Image (tube, helix red, strand yellow):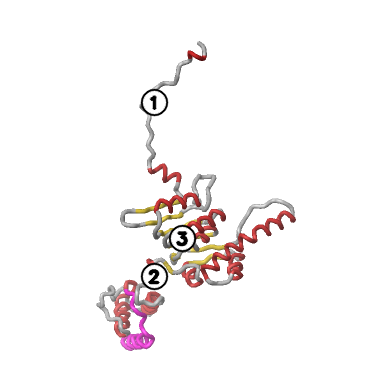
Amino acid sequence: MTIKTLPGAPEGRPCAGVSSQLQPRALDRWNSGVRAAADSEGERSISIYDVIGYDYWTGDGVTAKRIAAALRGMGAGPVTVNINSPGGDMFEGLAIYNLLREHDGEVTVKVLGLAASAASVIAMAGDKIQIARAAFLMIHNAWVMAVGNRHDLEEVAATLKPFDDAMASIYSAQTGQDTKAMAKLMDRETWIAGEAAVEDGFADELLPSDKVEKGASKASASAVRRIESALRASGLPKNEAMRLISEIKTSSGDPAGSGEGDPTEPGDDAGAVPSEEAIAAALRSFSLTK
């Protein structure tokens, strides 16, 4: 058989019985660290629940490429970014931060558990930053693995300084504090809980589910619980303690039965804290009738 007489390539469908179909589960496995949703009701969210940067061990991880694809898929408009991440690659974190800052629409960041290291940088990209009461930010200086003599290590330290300065500048822009103050927090590897994050300016507010109801002071729930605890410690049954607390609220301008919840359950009523005079009068009455 000569070359000229070799058989040609088969025509038609040589593997007609074989087909392939890409299942959604396959995409989920490929992109498990990033979740994007845009439903008919207008929900537009990206959830970051993995390390920042590509994870060579698992193939997962949150990369700027994946975030960019999610943003392109949703298009212009508001977007919510949910974060629970230990951090990771600083360059990927900075790229994601800038992608979110450049997005055409309002970006709301919600820190649900942890936004540490590079993830804390991403969190600062929000036009509005919300954090759970039981969530944390963690900020620190950039880390590297280095090998060499003292001159090599001095050179590495000098190389890292601009990166630390860049992070301090991002935190400073959000909090309104100067970069030197941010650098000190980074030097100490600082963990910042939800309420402290709001107080220090790293976040704008707590998550809606963690806010005290309208018309209540921050101390209302804890104050009522302390009163209940003191009354029960003195030997008063729970139902009597609840009744007395209800009377205190009524005398302080929060009448029972106002529709704000069951007045016998202090945890369900977020009314104003009774005045000191009302508390003192009710307790005096209790001591006289006991």
Answer above or below: position of 243 versus 96. Answer: below
Residue at the spot 45% in from the left edge and 50% down from the top edge: 69
Q: Which residue in the structure is indicated by mark 3? A: 113
Give percent across and percent down for residue 172: 55, 68
Which image quarter: residue 43?
Answer: bottom left
Residue 182 left/right relative to 41 = right
Residue at the spot 28% in from the left edge and 73% down from the top edge: 261
Q: Residue 211 carries which label?
A: 2
Q: Which of marks 1 and 2 is nearer the N terminus?
A: 1
Foreground residue among 249 and 169: 169
Residue 56 left/right relative to 225 = right
Q: Give the range drawn in magenta.
A: 269-290
- Please identify the dominant SS of the magenta region: helix
Element type at marker 2?
loop
Within 10 Å of disc 3 (Cα), the crowding (few <14, some 14-19, many 20+) is many
Give percent across and percent down for residue 269: 32, 74
Q: Mark 1 or mark 2: which is in front?
A: 1
Answer above or below: position of 251 versus 187. Answer: below
Real-space CA distance between mark 3 and mark 1, rounded to the nearest whole angstrom: 50 Å
Q: Earlier in the sequence, mark 3 or mark 1?
A: 1
Q: In which quarter of the image is the C terminus?
A: bottom left
Answer above or below: position of 106 versus 57. Answer: below
Q: Is residue 277 magenta?
A: yes
Q: Which residue in the structure is indicated by mark 1? A: 15
